[in-house]
Amino acid sequence: TLQKDITANWSDWNANSWYYNGKYYQKYASLCLMAADSTIVGADTTLLSYCLEKLEAMIEPVLNNTLSPLLMYDTLYSGLISSSIFKTASIYTEFGNGMYNDHHYHYGYFVTASAMLKHLDPSWSRMPELERVIWTMLRDVANPSADDKYFPRFRHFSWYLGHSYSHGVTSIENGKDEESTSEDINFYYGMTLWGR
């Protein structure tokens, strides 16, 4: 049941991966959306209140930059990357996040879930902090401004082909790839929700 899912143990939240943490966060935010639907839960808002409290607690480590591995700004390619690449010395850690692979997947879950949270609790006391984090993630992936000195324009998106590339800055024998259309769409869906 919805109540069982919402009150379950979500201790896997800190999975030491921006990709998996984002998936947990969006999944839980989706449960909160269901808890806000009176056709599902009736007029009682107790479950929604519980869900929002837990959802807000889930995102606080991101706001405090204490979620492991930490995010950092990379001056070489001007972007937001997971620090795990420096701990493991492997470009493939976190699916290559440190080499700019899959940022629209990883950050898309945070953008979409945060848009849901903003819709459900726009007056949350930490919303201004959340907005700064999400705008930074959006700028990393889909910055539209040529005047932004911190992030390139449309890092992953190909206007010619009409989709985002998953592969980052390393060379690849067969060219860049577009591997998960659903996660690509999830990012742009979240960006649209966030902009409402």
Image (cartoon, rainbow, N blue to C red):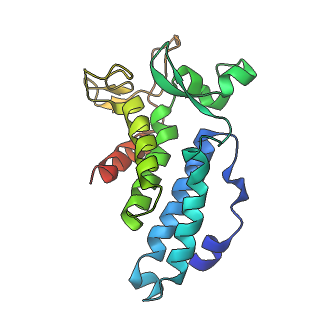
Is 88 left, or right, of 125 in this rendering?
Answer: right
Q: Is residue 1 in sight in this rendering?
A: no
Quadrant containing the C terminus is: bottom left
Q: Residue, x 68% and y 61% (percent of image)?
A: 10
Q: Residue furthest bottom?
A: 43
Q: Residue, x 40% and y 47% (percent of image)?
A: 131
Say if 81 sits above or below 29 in the image. Answer: above
Quadrant containing the N terminus is: bottom right
Say if 30 sits above or below 73 in the image. Answer: below
Say if 167 sits above or below 62 in the image. Answer: above
Q: Quadrant of residue 120?
A: bottom left
Is 171 left, or right, of 87 in this rendering?
Answer: left
Q: Position of residue 66 (x, y in %)?
A: 65, 42
Q: Position of residue 107 (x, y in %)?
A: 48, 40
Say if 95 sits above or below 110 in the image. Answer: above
Most foreground residue, 108 or 123: 123
Q: Position of residue 156 (x, y in %)?
A: 39, 26
Most foreground residue, 34 or 121: 121
Q: Residue, x 48% and y 76% (percent of image)?
A: 35
Is 13 left, or right, of 131 in this rendering?
Answer: right
Q: How many marks?
A: 0
Q: Residue furthest front?
A: 125
Q: Position of residue 153 (x, y in %)?
A: 31, 23
Q: Is residue 174 in sight in this rendering?
A: yes
